[in-house]
Amino acid sequence: MKIQPFGVSARVLLAAGFMMASVAAMAQPAAPQGQPTRLRGTVQQLDGQTLTVLSNANLAVKVTLPENLNVLAMERRSLSDIKDGDFIGVTASKWKDGQLHATEVHIFPESMRGAGEGHYPWDFPETTMTNATVTGVMAESDGRTVKLNYKDGQTSIDISPETPIVTFVPGDKSLLKPGVAVFVMGTLKQDGTIDAFSVTAEKDGVKPPM
């Protein structure tokens, strides 16, 4: 299969995926048929264009991959890599102090700027996803606080030194080996299978943290 350049196609896939704000995780079979959905788990096998994933709920789910699928991977980054002007995505939860605290951060490549921009509920309980531009980075004794601007508002989120921070890099189907962690976005079909439009796979031990 010819792998497309990491540019517009990948950006469109991620933009579509991260705009799905309040959809239940694909691990739950009760998700409405035909609705966009997410699946987290590990690869059991790849047979042609059919990927079998063991979900985090211990369910074997069949995923149909399109011929032109862009498989994405991730590389580790650090707090020092987050700078003013970066476009980032942050999964966060609100603590008792009333402040949002990051559970993971992904730094978008410039070609993916604007993907899923906004601040909205994520599918883990009581978490949010914020895809926005960094407009300030303040050093704290226990990490960093970033100010984020998006098209409908702004917020600030604390990031600790232990928070997983990654960036997207090109991948291909050769990454989809048994035991590899994957994050799939797609559409749930009536038979319980998924038509995928985006797959992010573990590479060099870096698992999709979303």
Image (spheres, rainbow, N blue to C red):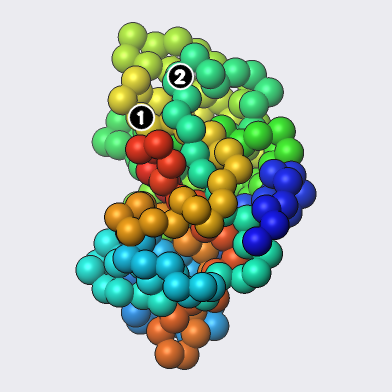
Q: Which part of the image, by quadrant, shows the N terminus?
A: bottom right
Q: Tell me where residue 183 appears, x and y as whole percent.
A: 44, 56
Residue projecting furthest to the right: 8
Q: Residue at x 45, y 10 (%)?
A: 139
Going by the numbered disc 1, the residue's amino acid type is Thr
Q: Tell me where residue 36 appears, x and y as whole percent.
A: 54, 71
Q: Is residue 117 above or below residue 40?
A: above
Residue projecting furthest to the bottom: 190
Q: Tell me where residue 19 appears, x and y as whole percent.
A: 61, 57
Going by the numbered disc 2, the residue's amino acid type is Leu
Label 2 neighbour load within 10 Å: few <14, some 14-19, many 20+: some
Q: Residue at x 35, y 38 (%)?
A: 205
How many tags in the picture? Answer: 2
* Residue to which mark 1 is pinned: 163
Residue 79, which numbered label? 2
Relative to the observer, which residue lies in front, 39 or 104? 39
Q: Mark 1 or mark 2: name the one nearer the start of the chain.
A: 2
Q: Quadrant of residue 93?
A: top left
Relative to the observer, which residue lies in front, 179 or 209? 179
Q: Quadrant of residue 168?
A: top right
Q: Residue at x 44, y 81 (%)?
A: 193
Q: Residue at x 35, y 23 (%)?
A: 160
